[in-house]
Image (spheres, rainbow, N blue to C red):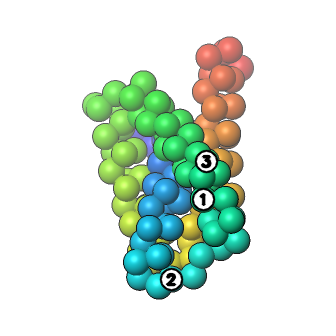
Amino acid sequence: MIDQSFLLAVGAIGWGLSLATYRPLALKAGWPLGKAQERVPALTLVVAVVSIAAGLIVAGTRGALHGGVAMVLLGIALAVFWSGFLRVGAQSALFLAPLAALTLALCWLMAAAGL
């Protein structure tokens, strides 16, 4: 079932993976790095890990038969597209990954509270 949390989880996983893998790929391929990735690579990695974790938690709670596997696979595909084809997409992922993770957490809390 594709709903808001499904799309947010795919985004959190995909943009998080893109953010986590962009620096090593960029250094190897000679692609440009943004200021944040040059100056504070540890912070970008922390943002990436938290975003990926948020997406994986939602995928895990959904279960394999209810879209969890699809979330992970589509998240990986998004990361490949975002980093591989867009190249500078990791700069926008620095904004989009935590935004998706935060929105996902808020949706999850609202659902748990029955709102």
Q: Amino acid at mark 2?
A: Trp
Q: Residue at 62% of width from left, 17% of height from top? A: 112
- The relative height of residue 32 versus residue 95 in the rendered view (above or below) is below
Q: Which residue is mark 1?
A: 41
| Of the two numbered discs 1 and 3 in the rendering, the one whose residue sits closer to the viewer | 1
Q: Is residue 97 left or right of residue 7?
A: right
Instruction: Give amino acid for label 1.
Output: Pro
Q: Which residue is mark 3?
A: 47
Which is nearer the eye, 17 or 114? Answer: 17
Residue 87 lies, in percent from the top left, at 50, 78
Which residue has dot 2 on it? 31
Let me know if residue 61 appears in the view: yes
Say if 7 sits above or below 95 in the image: above
Q: Nearer the viewer, residue 81 or 40?
A: 40
Give the amino acid at mark 3: Val
Q: Mark 2 or 3 closer to N-term?
A: 2
Spot occupied by residue 11 in the image (x, y as percentages of width and height): 53, 52
Tell me the SS state at disc 2: loop
Q: Can you tell which quarter of the image residue 108 is in?
A: top right
